[in-house]
Image (cartoon, helix red, strand yellow):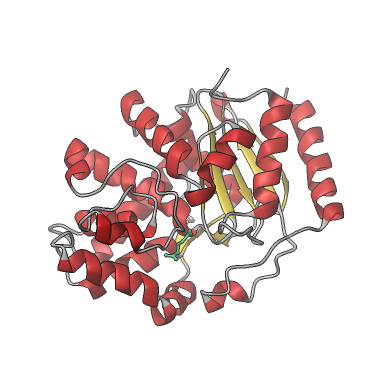
Amino acid sequence: MTDALKTFLTDLDLDIRAQGDWGQVADYIPELGRIDPAQFGIAVALPGGGMVSAGQARQRFSIQSVSKVFSLACVLGRIGEQIWTRVGREPSGQRFDSILALEHENGRPRNPFINAGALVTTDELLTGRAPKETLAEILGFLRAAAEDDDIHIDKAVARSEAATGHRNAALAHYLKSCDNLRNPPEITLGTYVHQCAIEMTCEQLARAGRVIAQLPGAPRMLTPLKARRISALMMMCGHYDGSGDFAFRVGLPAKSGVGGGILLIAPGQASIAIWSPGLDGYGNSRMGSHAAERLAHHMGWSVFG
Ligand code: GLU
C-alpha cells in the first residue's frame, strides 16, 4: 500500500503545482504575509510507524490554529470535562476571529477552535503556571506525540502577531469583562500568539496527529474517548464557517490554521498533515483542502462509511 500511496501523493503534488490556484496568504499577520503561497507539502502517517510524503513535507511552517487541537488535549488531560463550563462545543458558523456571538452568549465562546474559545483554553492552561511553563506543556505534548524534540516556536511570527492582533486583543478583553478570563488579557494573549507560532513540518505534524487518530504503535497519550471527542470537535468546528463544506467534501475530522496547515484524521487508519499557505475566503488552505478531498476519495477514507 505504501508504494501505491507514494505514487498517488507524488502525482497529487505535481497536479497541484500545475493547477497553480493557490489563494492568498494571511497578511493580517505581517510575518506570514511575506510567505510565497505557491508551496505544497503532504505527509501521511500510517499504523505501525509508516510515513509516506511528497512535496515540501519537511519544510517548517507556522501551525497557527492547528495548535488549538493540542492545547485542548492538554486541558482535557488536566481538568477534563470541567472545561465545558467555560467554552461550548457547537459550530460557530462565523469567522475564526468573530466577536459577534460572544456578546449574545455572555462571553462563553461557541467552541475551543475559534479564537475566543482557544483564548479561554489557553487561559485555563495558565492556571497555576507561568506562560513559559504553559508553552512548555503544549510543546512537550507535541514533541512526545511526534516523538521528535526538534519542534520550536518561531518568535518572529509571535512578535508579528502580537504587534497587530487587535481583534484577538478585543476578544480577550471582552472575555475578561464577562469574567471568563482569569489572567490579565496581555498574559493570555501573549501565551496564545506564541502557541500559534509553533512551527512544524508536515511529517512532524502527521506523527503528532497519530495520538488523535489512535494509530497502532503511536504513543498512548489520549484515551479513546478523548480522541473521539477531539475528532468530533474537529469535524464540526475545525474549519470555522467552512466546516460544513469541508465535512461534505472530505468526510474526515480536520483542523486548519491560517499558516496554511491542515491536520486530517482518518480514525484508526491514518494521520495526515497538509501544508499550502494560500488561503480561501474562510481562512482555510485552498490547495490543502483540495488535496485532502482528493486523498480521502482516493483512499476511501471517511467517517461516514
Ligand atoms: N493566530 C491566529 C489568529 O489568532 C490563528 C488563526 C488561525 O490559524 O485560524 O488570528
Query: What quarter of the picture does the N terminus occupy?
Result: top right
Q: Position of residue 106 (x, y in %)?
A: 20, 57
Residue 220 shows in this picture = no
Q: Nearer the viewer, residue 126 or 84?
A: 84
Work out whether 235 lies above or below 4. below
Residue 14 in the figure: left or right of residue 234: right
Name the residue furthest top.
305
Name the residue furthest bottom.
163
Work out whether 216 lies above or below 95. above
Q: Position of residue 20 (x, y in %)?
A: 81, 58
Q: Residue at x 42, y 53 (%)?
A: 67
Residue 117 shows in this picture = yes
Q: Quadrant of residue 119?
A: bottom left
Q: Residue at x 36, y 70 (%)?
A: 168
Q: Position of residue 171 (x, y in %)?
A: 30, 67
Query: What quarter of the picture does the C terminus occupy?
Result: top right
Q: Residue at x 35, y 62 (%)?
A: 100
Q: Position of residue 233 (x, y in %)?
A: 40, 38
Instruction: Report ligand 1 position as a quadrant.
Output: bottom left
Q: Quadrant of residue 124?
A: bottom left
Residue 185 in the figure: left or right of residue 252: left
Work out whether 51 lies above or below 120. above
